[in-house]
Image (cartoon, helix red, strand yellow):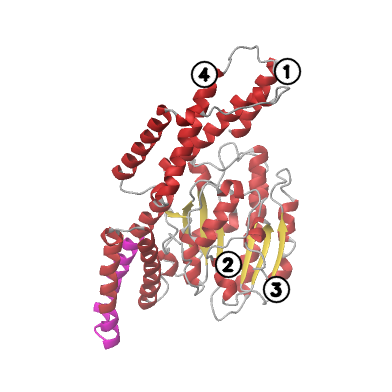
Amino acid sequence: MPYTTDLVEKGTTHVFIAEAKAPTVTMPRIKALMTGRIPGFIDVIMNLNSPALKEDNLIWQAKTVGKRIIFYGDDTWIRLFPKHFVEYDGTTSFFVSDYTEVDNNVTRHLNNVLKREDWDILILHYLGLDHIGHLSGPNSPLIGPKLSEMDNIISKIHKSLLSKKETLPNLLVVCGDHGMSETGNHGGSSESEIRTPLLFVSSAFQRTGGPPKYPELIQQTDIAVTLALGLGLPVSRNNVGKLLSPVIEWKSAREQLRLLHLNGFQLTQLLQGNVPTYEKDPGFEMFMKAEKAHGNWIQYYVDGSNTQVVMNLSKKIIKQYLEALKILSSSLSQQVAQYDIYSMIIGMMIVLEVLFLLLLSLPKALSTKAEFQIPNSSLCSLMFFLMCLLWSAIHVVVCTSTESSCYFCSIPWIVVTGVIILASGLFWVIISLLERQDFGFSLNCGKSNSWQMVAIRILTLSHAI
C-alpha cells in the first residue's frame, strides 16, 4: 500500500494499533466503535440478525444535531442504525465467496459522493479483504491485489479531501473492525484477531519528525470518544474509552484541558453508577485532583499570569488527566468484563436437569401407551428438604464470601426460594426416575427399536448442547 505508507511516513497522520475485545465478529465490533462500550458475548448470536441499536451512540448523537451521514457497505450498519443515514446502500456480508462485487458496490458511489457538498460524515465498510481471509487465509495471493485496491481508494478519498476548501479541517480515519487468524477466520482472542491498524489523517495535525517506531497500543473503545469530541458531540453515556491525546495535540492548552475534562467527567459518572466504592478508585481520586488543579489554572489564565508558568502548569495537568483517564478506563473495562459465574452455573444446572428429565421420559413418551408419571414421593421425602437446605446454605456462603453480589442477591427472596425449590425438585425427580429406569437394551417401547431410542437421545442431547 505505497500511498498509505507514504502518508504514515511523511504526512500529517497519527498511527495506532487498536486492540479489540473478544468476540471479534463484525456486529459487536461496530457497537464498540460507535458506543465506546465493550459488547457482551450474546452479541455473537445477534451478529446473524442485528436488531436496531437502542444504546446511546455516536451515529445517533450526530443525527440528533443535524449531521448528514452517508453509508455504503456491510448492511449490518443499516440494521443497527435504521433511519439514521440520509443515503445508504447495503451489501450482505454472508456471501463470503464474493470478494469483488461486495467492494465494487461501495466504490461505484465514490466519484459522485466525493464531488458533493451535502454530507458531513461518510462511512465506507469494505468486505473483500475479510472474505478473502475466509476463503484462502491471510497468505493468499489474492491479498496483495486487494490491498492495492484499498490503497487506491484511500488515495482517492484523501486527495479529494485535500482539494476541498473548508473552514474546518477534514478527518480521514482508516481502521479495521477485527483482524484474522492464521487460517483467515475471526471471532476469538488471538493477537492477530484482536489487533488492527488505526490511522488518523488530517491537515490539522502538526507532527514533527517521522512516524513512531512502535505505534501506541490503544483500545478500540477509545475511538468513539475521540470522534465524538472531535465532532463536538456529547460522549456516549456508556463509553469506557479514553481520548487519544495525540489527536488533539494541535489544539490550544485550554481546549485540550476542556476535552480531557469532558471525557473524565463522563467516565466518573459511569463509575459512580456501577461501583459503590467509586470514591476509593485511584482513577477517581486522581481525576478530582486534576479537576481542582484545572480550576486553579483557569483562574491564572483569566488573570493573565506569566505565560510560561501557565504553559508549564497546563502540561502538568494534561499529564494528570491522561493518567486518570487511563486508570478510569481500565477500571470500567474490567467492571464490564466481569461475569456472574455463580448465577450462570445455577442457570446451566437447571437447564441440564430439565434436559436429563426429557431424556429419561423419552422411552415412556414414545411407547404405545405414551404414559409418563412423575413420582410424587420424591417431593415429599426427607432428602428433598435436605437438598433445599443444602442449596440454601451454598447460596448464603457464596453470596457472603465474595465482595461482588450475584444476580440472585438482587431479586426478591421469595423468587430465590422458588428457584431453590425448583432445582431441588427436578434433581429428586431425576433420582427417582433413575431408580426405576432399566438401562439395558430391552427398551423396545412398543414399536421403537433400541437403536432408535439411542439415536433420539443423542439428538436431544446434541440439540440442547
Image marks 3 and 1: residues in contact by CB distance under 8 Å: no
Where 168 falls versus 142 (above or below)?
A: below
Reading the chain from its start, which is encountered first: label 2 or label 4? 2
Left or right of residue 51, residue 314 in this image = left
SS for callout 2:
helix
In front: mark 3 or mark 4? 4
The kind of residue on which mark 3 rests is Lys
Image marks 3 and 4: residues in contact by CB distance under 8 Å: no
In front: mark 1 or mark 2? 1
Q: Main secondary structure of the magenta part?
A: helix
x, y percent for residue 128: 68, 49
Q: Residue at x 65, y 39 (%)?
A: 140
The kind of residue on which mark 4 rests is Glu
Where 68 falls versus 271 (above or below)?
A: below
Reading the chain from its start, which is encountered first: label 1 or label 2? 2
Residue stretch rendered in magenta on the structure:
297-325
In front: mark 2 or mark 4? 4
Reading the chain from its start, which is encountered first: label 3 or label 4? 3
Where 189 falls versus 304 (above or below)?
A: above
SS for callout 1:
loop
State how far apart marks 3 and 1 are (Cα): 76 Å
Magenta includes 314?
Answer: yes
Reading the chain from its start, which is encountered first: label 3 or label 1? 3
Image marks 1 and 2: residues in contact by CB distance under 8 Å: no
**Which label was assigned to residue 435?**
4
Q: Which residue is mark 1?
A: 446
State how far apart marks 2 and 4 are (Cα): 60 Å
**Which label was assigned to residue 59?**
2
Q: Residue at x 41, y 41 (%)?
A: 342
x, y percent for residue 450: 68, 15
Where 242 falls versus 312 (above or below)?
A: above
State how far apart marks 4 and 1 are (Cα): 22 Å
